[in-house]
Amino acid sequence: MRINDALPQKGSRKRRRRVGRGISAGQGASCGFGMRGQKSRSGRGTRPGFEGGQMPLYRRIPKLKHFTVINPKNYTTINVGKLASLSENTEVTLASLMDAGLVTADDGPLKILGDGELTVPLTVKAAAFTTGARSKIEAAGGSCEVIAV
């Protein structure tokens, strides 16, 4: 078998339409595009999605900016800098912070954030810690304990 023997099946390929070659060719004069109008001109008729001036579908439907979280995790947050006012070796929990007045509202489990400086050692029990907060508490000689929510 040679490369010139490799041919498509008989009838699988149709000859191309030769337009504008006279009336006897079947597609003479206007080449099957009709008489006049936008769709008979050379080039593309209209751009994709164009609906004749009507507001197109891609502009009628609402745009999805983001998907909202169905069950978001809400935390009561406090920064490490606020804990510096507590005395040494205090056990810090959400209840103790409410009693001390450092946290006014219970918006969910306690999360410690890492803004500020801490010099006193504390035993902190919270649901979550940022990496900065954990490193600052442990650098001050304290300990971090994650409690289940």
Image: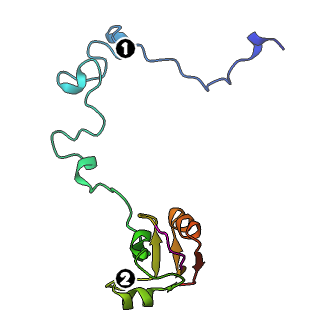
Q: Nearer the viewer, mark 2 or mark 1?
A: 2
**How many residues crowd mark 2 within 10 Å: few (<14), some (14–19), many (20+)?**
few
In the drawing, what numbered circle is on residue 107?
2
Q: Which residue: 36% across, 16% down?
A: 26
Please give the residue where the numbered disc 1 appears in the rendered image: 19
Magenta residues, as a range? Answer: 118-122
Mark 2: secondary structure: loop
Q: Residue 48 lies in what quarter of the image?
A: top left
Viewed as shown, does residue 68 lie left or right of 125? Answer: left
* Residue 51 in the image: above or below residue 112: above
Vertical relation: 13 (above or below) 76: above
Going by the numbered disc 1, the residue's amino acid type is Val
How many numbered tags mark residues here? 2
Query: How far across and down, in percent of the image, does residue 65 sit?
Result: 33, 56
Residue occupying the point 35% across, 8% down: 21
First in sequence: mark 2 vs mark 1: 1
Q: Outermost residue, left direction?
A: 53
Between 135 and 36, the one nearer to me in the picture: 135
Query: Identity of the amino acid at label 2?
Result: Asp
Q: Answer whether labels 2 and 1 touch (C-beta < 8 Å).
A: no
Residue at the image position 37 percent from the left and 67 percent from the top: 68
Horizontal arrangement in the rendering, residue 10 relative to residue 49 (left or right): right
Percent of width and height locating residue 124: 53, 80
Per the image, label 1 sits on a secondary structure element best described as loop
Give above or below for 44 relative to 116.
above
Observer-nearest residue: 47 or 131? 131
